[in-house]
Image (cartoon, grey):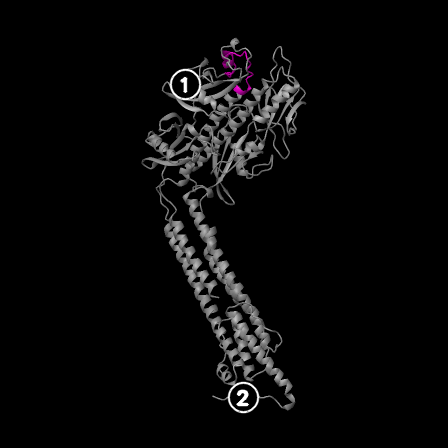
Amino acid sequence: MRPPIASLVLLLLVVAALTVICLAGVPTTGVPQAVLDGEQQIAADTALSMRTAIEAEANSVRRKAHAYPATGTTTPTAALKALTPAGKAVAGRVLLDARSGKLLATGGRTVPLGGIDAARTASGHGDIPPRLVTASGTRELLYFAKVTLPAQEDPDQDQYQAQDGAERQWLLVVSEALPALAAYGDGRTAQMLDTDGTVLATAVHGAVSRAAGGGLPVKASRAAHASGSDTDASGSLLGAATGSRRVVAGWAQVASTTGPGETDDLGLVVLTSRTVPATTKAVDYSGFAVQAAGALAGVALLLWLVLHFFVQQPLLRLFLSAGRLARGATDGPAAASVELSRPVPVHGFGELARIGRALDSLRGQLLGESGPQEIPARRGPGYRALAAAGVVVVACWAVPMIFLLDRADTASAVPAPVLADQEARTVLATHRIQQSLDQSYTELNEATASLPGANRDAQTQVLRQVLDEHKQYRSLYLLDRSGGITLRVGDTPLRTLVHVPHGGGITTVNASGRIPAIAAYAQVPAVKGKAPAAGVVLFGEIDVQALNSILPRPKLGTVWVTDDHERVLAASEGYEAFESLPDPDLTRLARATQGAPGTAGSATSAVHLTSSGPSVDAAAPLAKSGPTAHLGWHLVTAEPAAALQIPAVQAQQRTMLAGILALAAGAACLGWLHVVVIRPLRAVAVLVERLAGGDRRTVLHPVNHDEIGSITRSLELVRQALAERDRTARSSHTAGPSRPLREHTPQR
């Protein structure tokens, strides 16, 4: 019985100590950790967008070179012209002989080829990653692609052909400026840094403090360099303080998060910064923690006193009395005189009192002073009521801690910078979705150029190649002017809406079902002199799982993409297609992003109270331009404030945790006491009362090797002694009445 009582007291004291330690450790001044974490995540999201843009451009250059139909008579000038996309004429482009490095053709701006070994660069297998170079004092990116030409029988016909009759390769080198850098959130500065901390590009959103950039680029570059092999590392920094405001910054490397990537060796780092108000009003959580811990220690002391004097001590006395009766019943007349002469003390209440009274009755029966007697049933409170009262006492401390004290106010618990960061990250997420959908449309539009003039088998081969190269598509098909599918590759289309749109863009082709069908579409051009394609519009249904996979981001919470009726099309967590948002507040927030008719709308954010506490929510229109601008889609995010390191929410969480731990410890230990002490006591009380009432046949088997087990063994010895005496009395009833045990014992 001692372990449950000792464990209860010890655990409650541990919870009291943890209450002091945890609540006293809640920061109450300075910049909350949630603000630093938010800035770090904004830098990481910006770096991810930059990496996606660089990789998309590198893949576009390779895809163009791979699809170019080079022949043995192709000239470098004609090839370079064909490999220059519309609108990219200003970019620098050159063709080099991959074996000798000889310059074959140039176009656009001058390409900085210093330090580029064409033969060595093109000699390896696989794709060639981009490189960061300096041109005219500015930093640019070089993209590479191999152009394979077939061998020609007579090498003298073309000075660009190899002399050994084997296939040759040209190396396409494209020089472009770094992707445009954008800053998200009012008052924020975004900078692109190289490995030395040199600022390569800067973007500003709104009014920016002059102190925002002092010394931070060098610190960010050093932190990124110190990250070592962790190529996608990110972190946060604190900058200069001006009055009650301070600069917070986040940095992140432009590198792959899933293993070796094309941007890992560029050494680019994104740095974002803004000034935020520092918390100057301190909240004394430590004083409350000491008071709460003292109250819990008092509860622990009270429970120990009650259990010690009303359970432990009476049970030990009962254990000694039962042993004394057993010795008196088995050790002979001399021992009986000594052991049975003293009455059994009745201590406590409930089961222990019942057992004490029954033992004293058995003592009288052993002495022959009385016969079996029925002990009246008593319906007073037992030790189960004591255990339940103990749980109630602990609950009186724990329940207010869980539900009443240190409650975070919905309106003021979340600092304004945290709410602004959630909104900025939501806008960033819309740009990632737009990047993905724009890329899908661009790739589909490029595929349409290869369809006119080709026979049906060749067109099928083109679509299969697009499907194999671009895993985001689940199905590609051509529609005729009536909306019928004339050519298809991939899975069965999910479309239920039959229409033949004009132009190109992104649309949905169903309005119900288990899976939303989002598709890119592009018109198939009619080329004069060439046979038309099998259809007039090429559709590419996008796998919604590919869209879902780019939505989750750390500390952004749950993300939903909704249509113009606020029905869910994609989400970062499990969802049902075309269902409403899970909370009406989120629906109202999404509708609030809609601007006046003819405008694109703007992002918005709010703190909403949910069943699990405050939630930091934001919404933004999916795109203001591009192929998705006309759709009216939204992106909605919701992050529980409990997942952010906000002081008021941290205090609430830790207060609730202390209450839960105390209640769990009290219930567990008192439940343990009930199992090992109270419930066996109830069973023993019933058996000893039956034995005192004359039941000599029921054998008492000890279950446990503890105090109650010893009492049961002593009672079994008493039962055997009484049963033996009863048998002796029955066998000798003809010889006269038996003399009581007292007559055979010497009088003191």
**In this picture, which residue range is highlighted in magenta?**
65-86
Q: Is residue 661 above or below residue 531?
A: below
How much space separates mark 1 and mark 2, taking CA atoms? 122 Å
Q: Eyeballing the image, is 639 above or below 542?
A: below
**Residue closer to the observer: 217 or 17:** 217
To which residue does mark 2 refer?
744
CB under 8 Å between discs 1 and 2: no
23 within the magenta span? no
Q: Is residue 539 left or right of residue 615?
A: right
Foreground mark, 1 or 2, reads 1
Judged from the image, the secondary structure of the residue bearing numbered disc 1 is: loop
Give the amino acid type for the residue marked by disc 1 in the picture.
Leu
The residue indicated by pointer 1 is 113
In this view of the protein, which residue sits in the foreground, 296 or 523?
523
What amino acid does circle 2 point to?
Answer: His
* Residue 400 pos. (x, y %): 46, 53
Residue 83 counted in the magenta span = yes
Please state the horizontal and vertical placement of residue 724, each as a whole percent of the image.
Answer: 60, 81
Residue 467, horizontal then vertical, whole percent: 59, 26
